[in-house]
Image: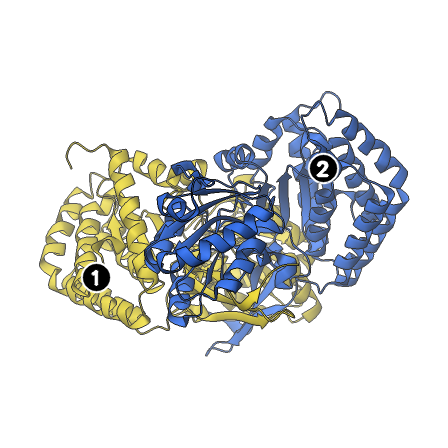
Chain colours: A yellow, B blue
Amino acid sequence: MGTESLAEQIEGMGRRARAAARALALCSADAKNAALQAMADALEASTDGILAENAKDVSAAAVHGLNAAAIDRLRLTPERITAMAKGVREVADLPDPTGGVIREWTRPNGMKISKIRVPIGVVGIIYESRPNVTADAAVLCLKSGNACILRGGKESIHSNVAIAQALSEGAKNAGLSVDVIQLVPFTDREGVRLLAQMDRYLDMIVPRGGHALIEAVVEHARMPVIKHYHGVCHVYVDRGADLAMAERIAVNAKCQRPGVCNTMETLLVHRDVAETFLPAVAAALWERGVELRGDVRTREVLGAKVAEAVEADWTAEYLDLILSIRVVDSLEEAIDHIEHYGSHHSDAIVTGDEASARRFLAAVDSAAVFWNVSTRFSDGGEFGFGAEIGISTDKLHARGPMGLEELTTYKYLVTGDGQVRG
Amino acid sequence: MGTESLAEQIEGMGRRARAAARALALCSADAKNAALQAMADALEASTDGILAENAKDVSAAAVHGLNAAAIDRLRLTPERITAMAKGVREVADLPDPTGGVIREWTRPNGMKISKIRVPIGVVGIIYESRPNVTADAAVLCLKSGNACILRGGKESIHSNVAIAQALSEGAKNAGLSVDVIQLVPFTDREGVRLLAQMDRYLDMIVPRGGHALIEAVVEHARMPVIKHYHGVCHVYVDRGADLAMAERIAVNAKCQRPGVCNTMETLLVHRDVAETFLPAVAAALWERGVELRGDVRTREVLGAKVAEAVEADWTAEYLDLILSIRVVDSLEEAIDHIEHYGSHHSDAIVTGDEASARRFLAAVDSAAVFWNVSTRFSDGGEFGFGAEIGISTDKLHARGPMGLEELTTYKYLVTGDGQVRG
């Protein structure tokens, strides 16, 4: 082991993952669910070991420059491990996303075609977040019949290794290969490149993290990448809006959880309602500590307490209690703004005018478009998917909230009685 | 124009395609169908010009090293242009693949979620084949609401430019932007790299061609690639097979059109039926001029007329009247062979034993798996898709025969009455 190069280690993981995936794809739903239960048990049984490893990460957190909030998210407790195990058991209770018939038809020559859901194979997940993601991602992959290779960030490497080991142990206890879940035990950036180039073994790669991480994956990837990128989400308050509703939605979209991707970063307001709406919404936002940055017309209404928004503000994902505001002349100008500056993630219109709403929903090319609903609902849980691997900002294969079904692909089974082509 | 660099030209095409795609995505089915009719008319009206340009390609064909069959495929005639226009009108008659509701549900909080089909945006298609592909690809993209940027091979560049120009004219005559269809008017390999890197404007890229072309795209691509790669397709004759049916299927899968990707390249035969089946199928194949290459046990039965198959034969896509044959001890050995050497395109089992068939269909990880049906049916037309952009050898987004629906993605429309997240 010690003499293996990084490349050889990654290659070995890929080869073992492929073999594990072949077997896993043929497992019954019951076998996979039994494994998930065993994985939850193993997590709980490994609580002491996981906590000891987590303590190493927490000690190193200051060195990694983590602030108090980030350290809190990093820190595991017995309760948090119990919650993690509970999450695993909840996934076991979800319907199996594979095996179902998507469509079935018979051709005039008598051959019957079934398009059925099957696992993708081997999924690579590269992330920079709380250690919980290790369990969430591994478990969703297993439920959907995929082997996974995980590569987490350096801040939680000890916790991640311990969690992945417990999950592998659980899988083994239920009779599956330990290789259904593998975690890259080092965090060199080189490992990202090696994974991204290994299209021989990896069928898909999912980067979740900052710009540099995603760029490194996109730059090198030879297999499909499903990016979980930033959300520059808009709420557009139309002239036909119920302004009390618009205020509730704007405040919710900005303040309910400002650090996540489906939060509003820019508020667009139709000029006809700007003078009425802006003072009301600004008061509500200021009360919650939000810093406002506006265009000229916004500042004409709200005054100098609003900073001047510069070009960079329109593309910024603040992930903080900061909001840019722009007054627009028309619905079309709002749509153009969103198409020009947005990230095609989640955008909302507030209006009582159905024609305007329909135009907005059709013309805004985002994964999720909302009419009189807060963008904060762009979420697998809120959509009713039961579990979420994230929110895809890509358009192909998976778009928007990505649940178990988005971890599957399909194949065609064709049966007949000797049909040959004439 | 003359002073623009290649990079600037490609960038300009991308920018114009994006603008055209935004408008096209909002066109009604009727508007798109009217454009398709106008495009068919324009093709017919441009017959003389297209034939004149095609004559230049045909004159240069010998320089490009094309053989007589390839030159025949390259050559256009008034009848072939009429057939091309007829193909365009047939696509107009197909159902619109966009706008439909994939799934619709209401959440407990009253918000209604609709998952609807929408165009992908801008599709790049890179190909090395007959000029007909120019019309086929452009028309399928337009029908599905996508702008396209086409880049054909040097052998048919003059024909391609003339055809694309006629199609653009037709689009313009029907009130659409000429930029819904653009063709790169030069064939430098550098153009492939520039297109593959232009993820700002291209949402998807589809390479159809040889290994070098596809490798160039995969190497550089920053957007999803849907490869149309080779088919190393197998027919496995199980010990439970009806041997007369197996012979018909094997002969059809090899001989009906040997130069295409869904043709059989390797025949696997269970040892229990080898002595009966091999002489019969060999006689039928030899009669049709097929060269056989076999493993040791095949040659023990068929003798020295069968050349020895070497390792490279098992991964070869002959695209010719050549077949490799191997005798296997079991169904599992057949499955392992296919997984090890195959290209996950289309593979068939011939058997009367349902348990063996089910095992084969489940365990072989190919886009299309056939039971008692020739692999030659792995085709959009034969599957009833009405039109085909090709056969994807990728697993994500589109797998196997790829029709109009595979040129769409989805978005979520969420409507409510002021829902905010608690």
Figure quadrant of the N terminus of chain A: top left
**Which mark identifies residue B120?**
none
Q: Which amino acid does label 2 sit on?
A: Leu
Question: Circle 2 — which element?
Answer: strand
Q: Please provide percent x and percent y for residue A84.
A: 23, 64
Question: Residue B228, percent across and down?
Answer: 56, 45
Residue underneath mark 2: B183
Q: In this view, does A245 lie to the left or right of A68?
A: right
Residue B52 placed where, x, y %? 86, 32
Look at the numbered discs 2 and 1 and tell me whether their residues touch, using CB distance below 8 Å. Answer: no
Q: Residues within 10 Å of mark 1 (few under 14, many from 20)?
A: many
Residue B409 relative to residue B294: left or right: right
Mark 1: secondary structure? helix
Numbered disc total? 2
Q: Residue at x 45, y 53 (%)?
A: B278
Q: Residue at x 37, y 73 (%)?
A: A95
The residue that label 1 is drawn on is A171
Q: Left or right: B79 with respect to B403?
A: right
Above/below status of B236 relative to B67: below
